[in-house]
Amino acid sequence: IKNKKMIKDFLIIDCTGINDSIALRINNKFFIKKLQTNLIKNEILALDIANFVKEHKIELNSNFSIIINSGPGSFSGVRVSLAVAKGIQIVKRTNVYSYNNFLLNASTHLTEKKNIFSLQKTNKFYYYCKGTFETNYHFTPPKKIDLKIFKSSESLFIVPNEIKNDEIIKNIDPKRIRIAHFNLKNIDLLIKNKLVENKLIKPLYLS
């Protein structure tokens, strides 16, 4: 992951259609604001961010970062997030990075240093990203589920809370399942493990 600058204070934009939120991490303190899902438009999101930043007396500049959830989820919501972040970047010279739901869900289990399969369901299909640990974690691009992966006896399977009771999950040894709960504060763990990206940021679209 290519984040050469230190990411200290930042704004998170998460508009994937589930738990839509914006958040600020300032001086090691988190402030989170829930957004109204399905009302994500450029002007509405920009106004929400402007009011949120003003409320917490934040100055956006080249020392500040914006971190966007690239998906999977609402393609239009992610595109709006990117458009607004790019607009702020042009005006305020902020730094822009991204993460995705596969990584966020896996974040609290990176200390185990085992192979990880992070699962997601979208458009009625199941996908996974595989994380392998050497000196750092490296995650593959998303792939559609092949039931053969469930035979990987030394791996952990990160399962979002909303699909934990799905039939396909019954194929996994319960001892190797970890349930993921949405928490934007875990972005700090992705930063620590160099798992945010600042190049070729685009919506994570799964067909």
Image (tube, rainbow, N blue to C red):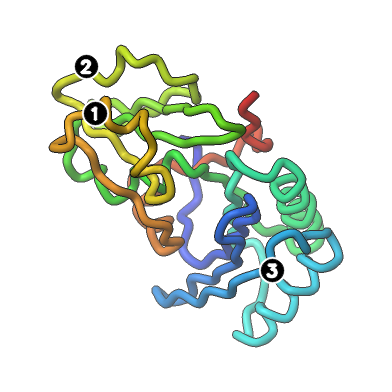
Where, by quadrant of the figure, is residue 148 drawn?
top left
Mark 3–mark 1 Cα distance, whole angstroms, equals: 35 Å
Q: Mark 3, mark 1: which one is toward the viewer?
A: 1
Q: Is residue 190 above or below residue 153?
A: below
Q: Is residue 175 above or below residue 185?
A: above
Residue annotated with mark 2: 151
User: Could you tell me residue 174's position as x and y percent?
Assistant: 17, 37
- In what element is the residue under mark 2? helix
Q: Nearer the viewer, residue 149 or 140?
A: 149
- Mark 2 vs 3, N-terminal side: 3
Q: Is residue 171 above or below residue 52?
A: above
Q: Residues within 10 Å of mark 1 (few under 14, many from 20)?
A: some
Q: Are marks 2 and 3 in contact (CB under 8 Å)?
A: no
Where, by quadrant of the figure, is residue 147 drawn?
top left
- Mark 3 vs 1, N-terminal side: 3
- Residue at left offset 62%, top offset 79%: 58
Residue annotated with mark 3: 36
Amino acid type of the residue that numbered disc 2 sits on in the rendered structure: Lys
Q: Is residue 203 above or below residue 179?
A: above
Residue annotated with mark 1: 172
User: Could you tell me residue 16's position as x and y percent?
Assistant: 63, 50
- Residue at left offset 73%, top offset 74%: 48
Amino acid type of the residue that numbered disc 3 sits on in the rendered structure: Gln
Amino acid type of the residue that numbered disc 1 sits on in the rendered structure: Ile
- In what element is the residue under mark 1? loop
Q: Is residue 39 left or right of residue 94?
A: right
Mark 2–mark 1 Cα distance, whole angstroms, equals: 8 Å
* Residue placed furthest toward the right: 43
